[in-house]
Image (cartoon, grey):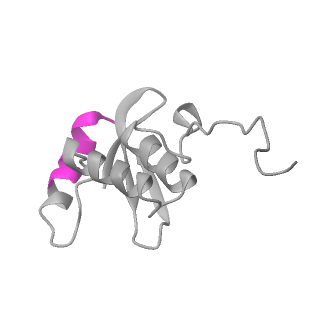
Amino acid sequence: VFKRRHMLQNAAMEIVLEDRRSGYFHFKSKKERDRLYQIMKVQPDIDEGIYTSMSIEAELKRWQRGEIDNYEYLKFLNTIADRSVNDLTQYPVMPWVIKDYKSE
């Protein structure tokens, strides 16, 4: 569960399921969103979507060791930067590949 912005207002929430499907919900107010967030975060088996510097460091190490690919790491960085494919105003940033380093 992630608190999100929608149309540059802090009044949205994104719920990401284990199978990577997600729902994006916009509320009338930040207060309404926060009320539901508080209810949800006390439920068992629900992650709050809060990343600590330790989890960010752990994900960096996984990428450096090759346990996750560039795409997965970029998706992670976009998630912690409050970007989502479910909000066009905060769409994830993906770099363009400008050179083919494998071909001759």
Q: Is residue 76 above or below residue 68?
A: above
How far across and down, in percent of the image, does residue 30 sit? 27, 35
Point out the image quarter for the N terminus: bottom left
Q: Is residue 85 above or below residue 43?
A: above
How far across and down, in percent of the image, does residue 78 sit? 46, 41
Number of callouts: 0
Left or right: 34 as drawn, with respect to 15: left
How far across and down, in percent of the image, does residue 36 sit? 22, 52
Near-viewer residue (66 or 68): 66
Identified at 51% across, 46% down, the residue is: 74
Residue extending farthest to the front is 104
Q: Is residue 79 above or below residue 88?
A: below
Magenta-colored segment: predominant secondary structure: helix
Q: Is residue 42 above or below residue 77?
A: below
Near-viewer residue (42 or 36): 42
Residue extending farthest to the left is 42
Q: Is residue 83 magenta?
A: no
How far across and down, in percent of the image, does residue 95 sit? 64, 36
Near-viewer residue (43 or 50): 50
Identified at 40% across, 38% down, the residue is: 82
Left or right: 103 as drawn, with respect to 6: right
Identified at 46% across, 73% down, the residue is: 19
Left or right: 104 as drawn, with respect to 86: right
State the extent of the magenta-drawn residues as a range. 29-38
Identified at 22% across, 55% down, the residue is: 48
Left or right: 10 as drawn, with respect to 35: right
